[in-house]
Amino acid sequence: MTERAAATAPLTPRQQEILSLAAKGLTNADIAGVLDIAPGTVKVHMAAVYRLLDVSNRTEAALVLRAGQAPVSDGPSQGNAIAVLPFDLFSEGQGDAHFADGLVEEIITRLSRWQWFPVIARQSCFAFKHQTNDIRQVGTELGAAYVVEGSVRHSKDTVRVTAQLIDARRNAHLWAETFDGPRSDIFSVQDEIARSVAAAIHPEIVRSEMRLARSQHPQDVDAWQMGMGGLGQIEQREETACRNGLALAARALELDPECLSAAYAMAQGNYLQLVFQWTTDPMGCAQAVVEYAARCKRIAPDDPYSFIADGTACMLRGDIDAAIEQLESATKRNPSSARAYSFLGQLLGMRGDPDAGIECLEQAIALSPHDSAKWAMLAAIGICHYGAGRLDQCCHYLHRAADIRDDETLVWSMMASAAATAGWQDEAEAALAELLRVQPGFTIEGFRLVGGAMLPAYLERFEAGLRKAGYTDPS
């Protein structure tokens, strides 16, 4: 294998995806399942990878990738990788060890479906089985910034799994949870626990990387970290922070045009400028959402965040059916994505199927009960109830959302409309006052730019309710 061939091989984005997954220890069948392509297609791509990298097998190809010689730029560095260690077993019943090992393998497979962070291969992680591990040392040896460890206990009728996520660089615990299930349906329990663990871990790591990016000097971060820092500022949902985040994300894309975190941040930031009416060029922001969503899909076509960005673009174009199709694809490819289920639920509610929307939103909350966007999930459930005419339930969920975040335009505008429609004028006027406190320049015209894909009857009801609450157009 020549260094020059390894360094300059022109891998396509799909070949880069396949090589990254192969380096994590996935078989052709596993890769085909993750990417929703035929195993034969994976085999063809791997043959091309061997030729382009001038290697003869997967081991050599993985070494090229891990040495940083292959031009794989559609994800973060190996230094942000996740390792899932074998879980400790505190019972010795028949099949208990197989359950524990199978659970870890399932978690690894599900985490690999996220394309934001590399996942260390099973073989490397299982080298630490039956050892008392120093997490810092494990992270150093595996090249992993994050380590998942846990334990499994069986009783006569119940299995209990405890899992925790640790930042190996600082030996800091980020998340821990305990899961219980019946032994009578052990495979379903294994699948559900793995799904829940993967769903919880990804947002925790995203938040950790955002915090890390904020704490570092801009000259000390790479494009990926800069993109994460930009996204972190954008998700504060505050005007100045959003603009600063967009500037950071734009800089990250200058450094690396294939940086997924930055492309997604640009799509999300421009969308929020529309939502909060922070822009004097709404059509320009809408076009930017469409363009950066397309870039996300080109960089990582199967990542849930790419589907979310593309679904947002479809919604802004008024094509809610296409948006729903994007999010349904996201939930099929990655059933652990709470954000995908959340957005799908919102879209179903907007299309006039509120009960199906509520079901998806409840699934999102079950997957990520401590999600930073839980307020939005609760608000969306409220809006689904609004569409169904259940105004008391609508206001109940909007109040729950406001308990988490009291500075959201969507919450107060919908609450003012719903309360006025129900005849609760005092509550409606109070909600309207909060809306204008949060966003003094709010206009119904601006709301229509974001919510234009809603059923016309919903928009008409929303506007009538808001005016009944006392809203008047700015002069």
Image (cartoon, helix red, strand yellow):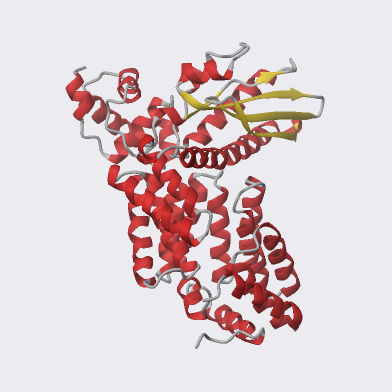
> Which quadrant of the view contains residue 149?
top right
**Of the pair 196 and 185, the residue shown nearer to us:** 196
Q: Is residue 291 above or below residue 110?
A: below
| Left or right placement of residue 5 versus residue 268 in this view | left
| 463 is higher (above) or lower (below) than 241 | below
Q: Is residue 326 visible?
A: no
Where residue 194 sits, quadrant-wise, is top right
Q: Which corner quadrant of the image does residue 78 belong to?
A: top left
Q: How far across and down, in percent of the image, does residue 470 sit?
A: 64, 86
Q: Nearer the viewer, residue 428 or 345?
A: 428
Query: What residue is shown at x 21% (from left), y 17% (from top)?
Result: 1
Residue 6 to residue 338: above or below: above
- Number of labels in the image equals 0
In percent of the image, x 74 and y 83: which residue is there?
Answer: 425
Query: Residue at left 66%, top 46%?
Result: 370
Report if residue 108 is visible in the image: yes
Q: Where residue 114 sits in the image (x, y, percent)? A: 47, 40
Residue at far top of view: 131
The picture places residue 417, in percent across and down from the top left corner, at 65, 78
Q: Horizontal and vertical percent for residue 258?
A: 31, 44
**Front position in the image: 238 or 419:** 238
